[in-house]
Image (tube, rainbow, N blue to C red):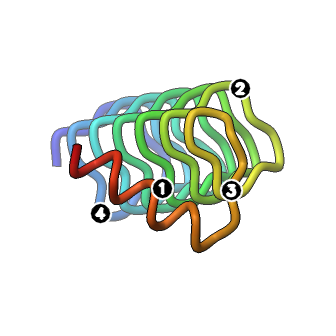
Amino acid sequence: MHIARFGWAKTCLDSVNLQDCERVYMSSGIQVKCYDVSFCFQMDNVRFAKYSGYSSRCQNIFGCMGLIDAKNCILNQSYSQQEYDILQTKVIDH
């Protein structure tokens, strides 16, 4: 599992300072009902985030910083759900 300083955490790997989260990988400071978060830091109440930090109450973010109540964002730019899915796949493939 390789996690340190955690409260309730489920299915997490190589992370530090977790509290009440699930499916977290290579992240730090992930707290308060986060789900499916990878390569992130200082997040709370976030779902489906990758390569992001300092965000709260967000969903579907990729490469974002300092967002609050945001959805479907890549590099802090908001997109529709369909545009987000297509662009995220392109960025990852590239």
Return the disc, 2 or 4, that comes first in the chain's sequence.
4
Per the model, the C-alpha gap separating discs 2 and 4 is 26 Å
Q: What whole-number distance in Å separates the C-alpha atoms at marks 3 and 2?
A: 17 Å
Residue at x 50%, y 50% (from the top left corner):
49
- Is the residue marked by circle 3 packed among few (<14), some (14-19), or many (20+) residues within 10 Å? some
Dividing the picture into quadrants, the one containing residue 55 is top right
Which element is circle 3 on?
Answer: loop
At which x and y percent is residue 39? 35, 36
Question: For the residues carrying marks 4 and 1, which lies nearer the camera in this image?
Answer: 4
Mark on residue 61? none
Q: Which residue is mark 1?
A: 8
**Residue holding disc 3:** 79
Tell me which numbered mark, 1 or 2, is placed earlier along the sequence.
Answer: 1
| Separation of marks 3 and 1 at Cα, in angstroms | 33 Å
Query: Given this view, does label 1 or label 2 mark the residue nearer the observer?
Result: 2
Residue located 48% across and 55% down the image: 8
- What residue is disc 2 on? 66
Amino acid type at mark 3:
Tyr
> Amino acid type of disc 4?
Thr
Q: Residues within 10 Å of mark 2 (few under 14, many from 20)?
A: few
Q: For the residue labelled by badge 2, is the local secondary structure a helix, a strand or a loop?
A: loop
Please rate how many residues cluster around mark 1, counting C-alpha atoms within 10 Å: few if below 14, some from 14 to 19, many from 20. few
Question: Which residue is identified by label 4?
Answer: 11
Quadrant for the C terminus, please.
top left
Q: Are marks 3 and 1 in contact (CB under 8 Å)?
A: no
Query: x and y percent of residue 54 in the render?
Result: 64, 26
Q: Classify mark 4: helix, strand or loop.
A: loop
**In the rendered structure, which amino acid carries the disc numbered 1?**
Trp
Q: Which one is closest to the eye, mark 3 or mark 1? A: 3
